Image (tube, rainbow, N blue to C red):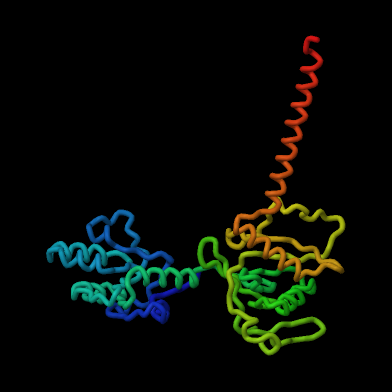
Amino acid sequence: MPDRFTIAKLIQCSELELKVLAGQKGLDRQIHSVQSNRPGLALCGHFDSFGYDRIQIFGKGEVSYLHQLSTTERHWILSRLFSYQIPCLVFTTNLTPSPEIVSLSHERQIPLLQTEHDSSTFTNFLLHFLENEFGPTEFIHGNLVDVYGLGVLILGPSGIGKSEASLELLRKGHRLIADDTVLLKKVSEHRVFGIRPNPLKHYMEIRGLGIIDVVSLFGITAIGNRKQVELVVSLETWNKNKVYERTGLEEQHYQFHKELIPKVILPVAPGRNISNLIETATANLWSKKMGVNAPEELNKTLTNMMNDDEKQDHIESWQHQALLFSPN
C-alpha cells in the first residue's frame, strides 16, 4: 500500500474522468481503502457502521432521495455526513450537487468530484484502479513468460538457465513479459500480476551472447508488459539424493502475500528439455482448470481396481467355504 495516496493523485487517472467541483483545499486527503461506499443508509439517518473512510459515491438514487427531504431534514443529514473525515464525494452521471453540499464541501475541505460515468461503471473503474495502486509489490529475480495464455514465472539461482529456457519458449511462439527482474503486484484476492520494469523494456541477457533485442529478433508480438502469474516453475540443479515428485498428487504452491500460486520444481540436468517441460506443465494446468486431473483420475482408477479385486477374492473365498460345508 502506498504511504500517501491522495485525492490529488486519484483525479490524475484519466479513465475515471473526474472533475473537481469544490473542496480543492482537501485534495491532499489520503485514501486508505480500495473499497467505495454508497451512503444510502447514512442519508436515512443510520450512521452505525458507516464506512466514512471510503470514497462516497452519489448516484441518481442518493440525489433523488435528498431532493425529497425537507430543508431541515436535508440540513441535518448533510451536516452529520460532513462531520466525518470522508476522503471525498463523487457525483456520477454528471449529476449536479446542491448548493448546500458545495458549501459544506468548501467549509469542511472535503473534495467534491464529478464524473460522467454511471455509478456501476465508475465503481468498477475505481476498484480496478485502487487495487493496482494499493496492492503489495515486490521485485524478484526471475523471468515471466506468457505460455499458452498463462503467465509462467520461472525462478532459480543465477546461471541455472532461466533466460535460455525463456528464449527457447520465444522461438516456439510464446511471449516474453520480463527477463531477469519481475515486479510482482497483488491487485486483488486470488490475482497476482507480474510486470516488466520499464527500464529493462524488451531486452534479454544471454550468457555467451550478451544483450539481445527481442522485438528485433522475434517481432513486436513476442513481448508483453504484464501478465497474471498463474504458474511458478522453480529450476534447480539435479540432486540425486533428493526425491522429486513422481505422481503429481501432492500439489506445491508459491506464496506471495498469502496468495498461493501453483508451483512445480524442475530439476535441471543434461538431456532434459526445460522449455518442453514448462510447456507441458502449463498445458497440464490448463487441463486441471478444465476439470481433468490425470494423477487423481489414475489414482481413482487404481483404487477401484484394487477394490474390485478384493471383492472378487471375498466372493471366491465365500464360494470355497460354501462348498466345504455343504451337505453331500
* Drawn side of residue 95 relative to residue 87, left or right: left
Q: Height in image: 99 above or below 320?
A: below
* Residue 110 x, y percent position in the rendering: 30, 73
* Drawn side of residue 70 relative to residue 134, left or right: left
* Drawn side of residue 14 relative to residue 157, left or right: left
Near-viewer residue (90 or 48): 90
* Residue 254 x, y percent position in the rendering: 65, 60
* Residue 208 x, y percent position in the rendering: 82, 84
* Residue 24 x, y percent position in the rendering: 31, 80
- Outermost residue toward the bottom in this view: 216
**Residue in view at x 74 percent, y 68 percent:** 156
Near-viewer residue (267 or 34): 267
**Residue in view at x 35 percent, y 68 percent:** 120
Residue 93 seen in this snapshot: yes
- Outermost residue toward the front in this view: 328
Near-viewer residue (308 or 271): 308
Q: Quadrant of residue 285?
A: bottom right
Total count of labels? 0
Q: Height in image: 150 above or below 240?
A: below
Q: Quadrant of the C terminus?
A: top right
**Residue in view at x 12 percent, y 66 percent:** 71
